[in-house]
Image: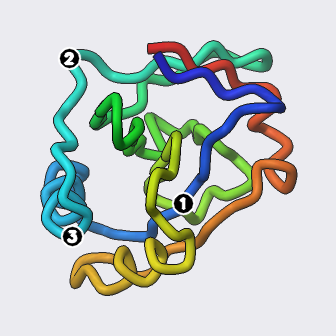
Amino acid sequence: MLTLEEDFDFEIFGICSHHPDYRLAFEINQKLNLRLFKSDHDFIPDLKKGTPGAFSCFEHIDEDFGAFYLIKNSAIGKHLIPEKSMIDYFLFVNQLNGIEIQKTVKILNDIGIVLATYHFDSSHLPSISSIHLDF
């Protein structure tokens, strides 16, 4: 289960890529040695404002390594994080065991289909506090 709250322990990476989610997940798996797989269902957040959208989601959960969620930022004209509407995907990472933020940004930027990667501080994303993500 992924829950984002004001005091959550997640790192957020924004990824710009014009490629489909399955292709990006494959490339991230290769570079970060993960096993992101398509969730059985799209992610439907409980948005405090407006009607929810169904966002494509890939996940990797490892008790020792942590949890990774690759979620598409747009779904039928809605954005998961509207203040970052130019971002195509968000990679939420819990328990950065052994992963350095700047190194992860560099690795993601080195993926040929990635145009740019950014690390975001949740305190600079006001909509995070209005999103309750449950899997």
The type of residue carrying mark 3 is Lys
Q: Are marks 1 and 3 in contact (CB under 8 Å)?
A: no
**Image x and y of residue 101, in percent:** 56, 69
Q: CA distance from mark 1 to mark 3?
A: 15 Å
Q: Which mark is residue 84?
A: none
Q: Please report the residue visible at 28 percent of the width from the left and 36 percent of the height from the top.
A: 60
Where residue 3 appears, x then y in whole percent?
Answer: 60, 21
Q: Residue at x 31, y 68 (%)?
A: 18
What is the basis of the colouring in this image? rainbow
Q: Residue at x 48, y 44 (%)?
A: 74
- Residue 32 seen from this side: yes
Q: Which residue is mark 3?
A: 31
For label 2, the SS is: loop
Give the answer, above or below, for where 95 lies relative to 1. below
Would you name the residue on which mark 1 appears? 13
Residue situated in front as seen by the camera: 46 or 34: 34
Q: Is the Cβ of the residue at disc 2 closer than 8 Å to that at disc 3?
A: no
Q: Earlier in the sequence, mark 1 or mark 3?
A: 1
Callout 2 crowding tier (Cα within 10 Å): few <14, some 14–19, many ≥20: few
Lower sequence index among marks 2 and 3: 3
Quote the CA–CA distance across marks 2 and 3.
Answer: 24 Å
User: Please, what secondary structure does the residue beneath circle 1 have?
Assistant: strand
- The residue pinned by badge 2 equals 40
10 Å crowding of disc 3: few (<14), some (14-19), many (20+): few
Residue type, label 1: Phe
